Image (cartoon, grey):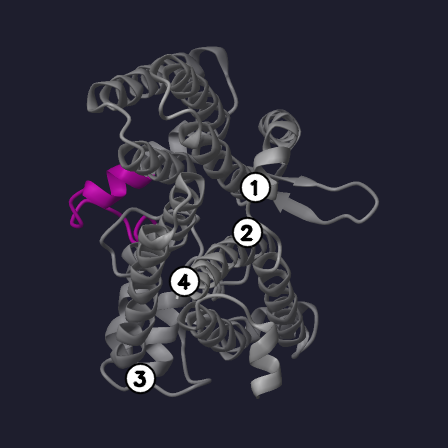
Amino acid sequence: MTAILKFIKGDKVIWGITLVLLLLSIPAVYSASAMISAKSQGDVHFLVRQISAVVFALIVVFAFSHLNYKSYLAIIKLIFPIVLVMLLMTLFSGVSHNNAKRWIELPVVGIELQTSEIAKIALIIFVSAFLAKQKNNEEAYKRNERIATIVFVATVGLIFPADLSSALMISAIIVLIMFVASVRIKNIYVIILVALGLAILYVLLAEAFHWPGRLSTWTHRIDVFFGNSETLSSDETYQSDIAKMAIVNGGLLGQGPGNGTVRYLLPQSHSDFIFAFIVEEYGAWMAVIITMLYLALLYRGIRIARKTKSLFAAYLVLGLTFAIVLQAFINIGVSVGALPVTGQTLPLISMGRTSLLVTSFSLGVILNISKYNEEQEFENQ
């Protein structure tokens, strides 16, 4: 055990949280997808796939926990134009699932990537890098603010038409980084107002000129969420009703592993609504544990950011940590009926290749920064 710990660098609590959530995903995804798997690929298809995904995720976390976080400063300017091209390709010729065009297929290998997830991480790194530079030079810092803002608005603008929830989530993350970076509140308000103005303009013109997007889906989901249950049809509230029924059926102790019924009723029980499925099988006590694990991750991320002496590292840790935790609570909020239905997965638990890759990368970066904090503390002793 001691020999293994020598290779595991960084915050051990975050390592523990990562391992617990990943291990929980294996029985949860297997049970939630059992019916789909039996009909299509065989009984153990999704089990094998999820075990492989968990192993791959741990390798990614381990690899990036050993890669110096400062290396991203040198490559982000080269990578970001590629990310913008990927977003444009997704918008006009991307792969569509469930009427949502959010993926591109990599040639030869045939793997699909959700480009908004890649862009989220790239944008966090880009904005953190620019806002951390030349803080002592007011004129240069203002220029960096403008560059970060333009790139932020452009990126979110490319994501917005096909993925409103991701666009809003990414906006919240970047605004948080800007607030922590002491960007003037007036400037933040201006950014928000400009973004809202552009979004409203797009909505007004999208229908008239048949621009790509999911305007009708957004408005329908919002209408259903805020609508009167007596006037809505059962088809319109089906997903939310089944998810809430699963949570009620779970009670305190749950129905037991393998005894959940949501998998027979809800196509996305292994991804978008896996939290409700877990509560049905394991009970409310498991919901509390999962929630506490994400809150513990948030606390450890803030703690790491406060300890680091690098502004870039501090902004990066906060952005990546907040991205994981915010996505988790959006997924949980949808499952319990507190938010409109979105396509956000539960980090480290839901099935989803790109989301798992991005989350694993984020955790690796956070762990690498915490490793440098520990080394600096040791040197100062």
Q: Decide: is 288 above or below 106.
A: below
Disc 4 from disc 1: Cα separation: 33 Å
The location of residue 106, given as percent across then percent down, is 74, 42
Most frequent secondary structure within the magenta stretch: loop
| Residue at (39, 40) in percent of width and height | 311
Q: Amino acid at mark 4?
A: Glu
The location of residue 209, given as percent across then percent down, is 48, 11
Q: Secondary structure beneath disc 2?
A: helix
Q: Secondary structure beneath disc 1?
A: helix
Q: Decide: is 274 above or below 125.
A: below
Disc 1 from disc 3: Cα separation: 36 Å
Q: Amino acid at mark 1?
A: Ile
Q: Are marks 2 and 1 in contact (CB under 8 Å)?
A: yes
Which contiguous range is marked in magenta? 221-237
Q: Of discs 3 and 4, which sits in the foreground?
A: 4
Which circle marks residue 5 in the picture? none
Q: Earlier in the sequence, mark 1 or mark 3?
A: 1
Q: Of discs 3 and 2, which sits in the foreground?
A: 2
> Label 1, on which residue?
118
Q: Secondary structure beneath disc 4?
A: helix
Disc 2 from disc 1: Cα separation: 7 Å
Q: Amino acid at mark 2?
A: Val
Q: Are marks 3 and 2 in contact (CB under 8 Å)?
A: no
Left or right, 161 with respect to 293, comes to right
> Is residue 224 located in the magenta-colored stretch of the structure?
yes
Picture quarter with the N terminus: bottom right
Which circle marks residue 358 in the picture? 2
Q: Secondary structure beneath disc 3?
A: loop
